[in-house]
Image (cartoon, rainbow, N blue to C red):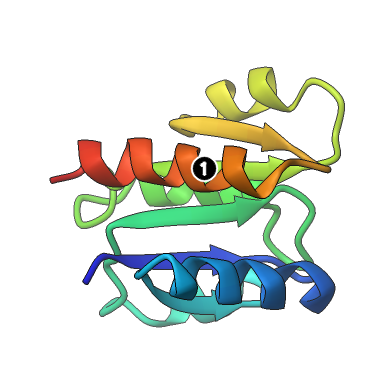
Amino acid sequence: MKHIVVVEDDHGILDPLTIMLESAGYQVSGFVDGSGLLADDSIVPDLFVLDKQLPGIDGLELCRYLKGQQRTKHIPVIMLSATTGLKALAVAAMADDALEKPFGMRDFLDMIAKHIDRSE
């Protein structure tokens, strides 16, 4: 089963994303900030979904960190945010893709599938 880590500080978004991804057959680990993810070196999923606006370490900074680490640099990262111009910010942070909020669930699942399939 493919493992996805979702880092989203808003439970109103994290919980439905988790339910949707689990219903689609993925194992999901959710975090409300990047510190839990940074503290546990054993977490090496098949894909990261990161919100841009996070408390503590910003999602873009977290993405750059993950892409700079030997154990996680090959793992696709999808950035989420309501920030205008997210795609350009995500590319600069070395993210593999970006989706602006609000987004359709089908668009989200299609993007996940595209990058999960690529990581095999």
Q: Is residue 73 above or below residue 15?
A: above
- Give coordinates of residue 120: x percent, y percent: 13, 46
Q: Quick check: 49 above or below 40?
A: above
Q: Is residue 55 above or below residue 76?
A: below
- In the picture, measured across the screen, residue 1 lies left or right of residue 76, that is left
Identified at 60% across, 37% down, the residue is 107
Report the side of 1 relative to 67 (left or right).
left
> Where's residue 9, x and y in %?
76, 71
Q: Position of residue 91 (x, y in %)?
A: 54, 22
Q: Is residue 69 left or right of residue 35?
A: left
Q: Quadrant of the N terminus?
A: bottom left
Q: Secondary structure at mark 1?
A: strand
x, y percent for residue 48: 44, 55
Closer to the camera, 46 or 70? 46
Residue at point 35% right, 70% down?
Answer: 25
At 75% from the left and 41% from the top, the residue drawn is 103
Depth check: 62 or 28 in front? 28
Name the residue furthest left: 120
- Is residue 94 among the parts visible in the rendering? yes
Mark 1 Cα within 10 Å, few/some/many (few <14, many 20+)?
many
Q: How many marks?
A: 1
**Is residue 74 in view?**
no
Looking at the image, residue 92 lies above or below residue 109: above
Residue under the point 48% across and 38% down: 111
Which residue is label 1 attached to? 78
Q: Amino acid at mark 1?
A: Ile
Among the 4 quarters of the image, the one containing residue 27: bottom left
Q: Quadrant of residue 55?
A: bottom right
